Image (cartoon, rainbow, N blue to C red):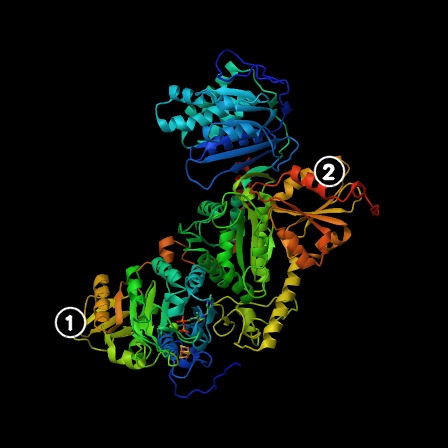
Amino acid sequence: MGYAEVSLFGDQGKQTVNLMKSIKSLNEFVIKFANVNGTGSASANNMFAKAIFRMGIPVSPKNIFPSNIQGLPTWYEVRVSEKGYLGRRGGVDIVLSVNPQSMPDDVADVLPGGYFIYDSTKPLDLRLVRDDVNYIGIPLTEMCAREYKDPRQRLLFKNVIYIGALAALLDIEFAVLTDLVRSQFKGKEKLIAPNIGALELGHRYVSANFECPLGIRVERRDCVGDSILIDGNAAAALGSIYAGATVAAWYPITPSTSVVDAFERYAKRLRIDPGTGKKNFAIVQAEDELSAMGMVIGASWNGARAFTATSGPGISLMSEFLGLAYFAEVPAVLFDIQRSGPSTGMPTRTQQSDVLAAAYASHGDTKHVLLFPSDPKECFDLAIEAYDLAETLQTPVIVMSDLDLGMNDNMSPPFQWDPSRKYKRGKVLNTEQLDAMERFGRYRDVDGDGICYRTIPGTHPSKGAFFTRGSSRDEWAIYTEDGDKYADNMKRLLLKWETAKNHVPAPELREANHATDIGIIYFGTSAEATHEALDYLANEGIYCDALRIKAFPFCNMVNDFIAEHEQVFVIEQNRDAQMRSLLLIECDAPPGKLLKILEFNGMPITAGKIRSEIKRQLPGPAQVTPLRKKTES
Amino acid sequence: MSYFKPAFRHPAAPTNSLGYHEDDYEGSLSTLCAGCGHDSVSGAIVRACFELSLEPHRIAKISGIGCSSKTPTYFLGNSHGFNSVHGRMPSVATGANLANRDLTYIGVSGDGDTASIGMGQFAHLVRRNLNIVYIVENNGCYGLTKGQDSATSDVGSHSKKGDPNPFESIDLCAVALQLGADFVARSFSGDKEQLVPLIKAAISHPGFAFLDVVSPCVTFNNNQGSTKSYEFVREHMEATGTVDFVPMHQEITTRYEEGASQEVCLHDGSVIHLRKGNNEYNLRDRQAAMGAIEQHKAEGQILTGLLYMDPDSLDLHSVVDTSDRPLNSLTEEELCPSLQALDNINESLR
Ligand SMILES: Cc1ncc(C[n+]2csc(CCOP(=O)(O)OP(=O)(O)O)c2C)c(N)n1
Ligand code: SF4
Ligand SMILES: [Mg+2]
């Protein structure tokens, strides 16, 4: 292998960028942008992903960013996959590098035969030259210096120029890009022409200097249907709007902040009282997460739908209150956008490592309903579900998203809303019902399902008032420290937990095409990578049934699934196999049966990892083929 | 064990304008130590609500944890109550008030609950000017955990345990003033004459109303050497003036001599009369109030009464511009946007 005509300095006539072993691919590749934080690269990079999406090709962009406002390296990795694989693939085919700081690592990242596109204003450090990589130099800084006077413009347009260059190199339809510019700058028309000009500049430069397109390129397809591209946090916020949430209390923390930001954005559009111009919502930035949770509990106790959004450190601080809400049976909705721990850990990297902390948050015997969305549509749907469940079950409900889902644009089916759907406000007594009652007992299990009737303060002049406290009360809400009464109440809460199993969303089963004894349990953002891995494994003759958990408590289907398979791999993104532990605690599964597949380096799990882990852990080739025939049905 | 009060009412017991008797505002029998100051505060709350003719079910009482925070069980039995977690009453009250701005909120806390574990929430509640009456039943110690010094205990004061407190005390009225509270008062559980009108004025105030009520703990901090004992407070209490509260629509029956009183008119038409005592200063002068508190402290005196008030206070709802109707009363139709709006959002994401 050697150089074909590799351009290091990029301007001596037209170059053919072509190694003997250049990667050739149509609509299947990974490109990574290496930028400097705070240089305005995000909007240009988004434009790239959106352009591919608008050409009908599935994309999955991921921001890989430091906990920093300006100056440190930041990356934007986009997987383009006509086959619709949206999980992180691993490996990079093309690097677009405008950050000298991270260049050595970025060069090393490129797969053999891949492409390294860089700013060639300064000559490339020869130590960075690999003979199995194609180098494409574009003098971005020089072009900007020539073209723009204002230093801010030089910085910003550099990003737009490289998108224009990519359009030529990868064969992106130019009209798609210009349309995007037009819609992005709607209302700021003056900016449209210069942006298109910058796109053209990049396009012209590479068209004149390189053989375009490259071996890797895109071509219009019809593979995205009516999908949308949105981050999970905005989706959860929109779900909260449709669910009728009126009170939001929060304390800023990455990666959850954008939930409340988006809620405010949508609420200002959709929740202003038409008559008075006043807000049909209230958002309070609390002094800390304890307070945020207290506000949610106070508002929910008083009959409003309320939520907070946080991440692991906030869950720790909210724990005392979560316990109170569990015992006092006050609804509450909490979005936990998980990240790597601890507070001073890697706050901008993804993980699913709050599973146990959330499931059993607080002291005393407590357990909480958890929901696990895996794409933006589910963030929307499960947000709505969370309010219904919290009020139906009169308990906190925690929506377990993560940074990967929450902060990245994810391709998703469109949001749907059934206008005939009614909010499930649960067992709340109104004035007439109270009137018809002899005596109201807040904690009496009238229906035998563990869920009692509640009242909202201010409802009835003489009936329905009660004193809310954690425990030490009888079923009439009268103070008592009688141990038997305490125990009875605890048993009723357990009965309510059983009832919850019938209310929470059921898991999603994907059966293999062949009968198999291998099961896979997965949840949340491991979904895309798992589905891709299942395809690879099936091609190799390894068949697995897969069950995606959407909620805790686990319903019987989860027990049955474990019972029906010889080995069950539990795929999750944390070190301690927390979901596996939860399954062991709650499902009576034999520990040896549940095998771990873990990713905990802060990056989303890949299909490759899942596939190789399954193959590594399967006992032997004999196990790989089905042991028993599935009974036909 | 639960305690029930004997249901006996004097046939001639008076009713208020709603037809309620005073005992309609009472709660279950107190389980606090006999003589505990907190019980007197409960009594004053009962009297104030009765005299103001508030609908009991339109009052919400919220507390933290402590002997003081237990008291909401012992007053307003027909009102909803919430005994939350230690030091966090402010946040629960904030959420509750955001959900329904139309109820009257009475927050009850202790000096431990507010000045230590809950100091952060207290400070931010003041800043947000939540419309609530915030009562600290201040006994200078942690009653419920058996008498440890609290952060409001004065330097050198000692409880029954005997060791003088070496640390500077926190004056919650001064803190509230500094953080912008528009109604700040101090009183004494043993002075119902002063306490009841102050509570009434606090309830009528449109924003955050703070009442620091010295309320002796007979069991752990009522000894010689304590600056929070009945005896000490009685001997060292000085009032800014005598407070009369005249609710809206009620005729003023007392005659006030020209120049002998300050009047504050509230937006609902109620009037507070402060009959001048020895310590007069302009009630609307925050700095003067701070100065007066400091000066009395330096002299070993406790300044009580209404210390500061601004009736033009704008509460949290006014600041964040929420709907005039309680948020918890908005219907699904009003809250849930249309399907068309969702379709437009979908379209914008393609
Ligand atoms: C998180 C937490 N820590 C500690 C306690 C124990 N505790 C209960 S009451 C109390 C002090 C109460 O003091 P104060 O608020 O002054 O009320 P008082 O009993 O004096 O009226 C403490 C420390 C608790 N309930 N919760
Ligand atoms: S311990 Fe003190 S504060 Fe608690 S009830 Fe007894 S006297 Fe009151
Ligand atoms: Mg105390």
Residue most toward the left? Answer: B258
Chain containing mark 1? B
Residue most toward the front? Answer: A127
Q: State left or right for residue B143 relative to residue A381.
A: left
Residue A132: percent from left, percent from top: 60, 22
Residue A16: percent from left, percent from top: 57, 14
For the residues bearing labels 2 and 1, Cβ distance under 8 angstroms: no
Q: Amino acid at mark 2?
A: Leu
Residue A182: percent from left, percent from top: 47, 28
Residue A150, quarter of the rendered image: top left
Instruction: Tell me the crowding category of disc 1: few under 14, some 14 to 19, or many 20 or more residues within 10 angstroms, Cα based.
Output: few
- Is disc 1 placed on a helix, strand or loop? loop
Gap between marks 2 and 1, in whole Å? 93 Å
Quadrant in which the N terminus of chain A appears = top right
Q: Amino acid at mark 1?
A: Gly
Chain containing mark 2? A
Residue A537 is tagged as: 2
Instruction: Tell me the crowding category of disc 2: few under 14, some 14 to 19, or many 20 or more residues within 10 angstroms, Cα based.
Output: some
Residue A363: percent from left, percent from top: 54, 64
Residue B20, quarter of the rendered image: bottom left
Answer above or below: position of A347 versus A7.
Answer: below
Q: State left or right for residue A510 relative to residue A431.
A: right
Answer above or below: position of B13 versus B259.
Answer: below
Is residue B269 in view? no
Label 1, ligand 3: CB separation under 8 Å: no
The residue carrying mark 1 is B259
Quadrant location, ligand no. 2: bottom left
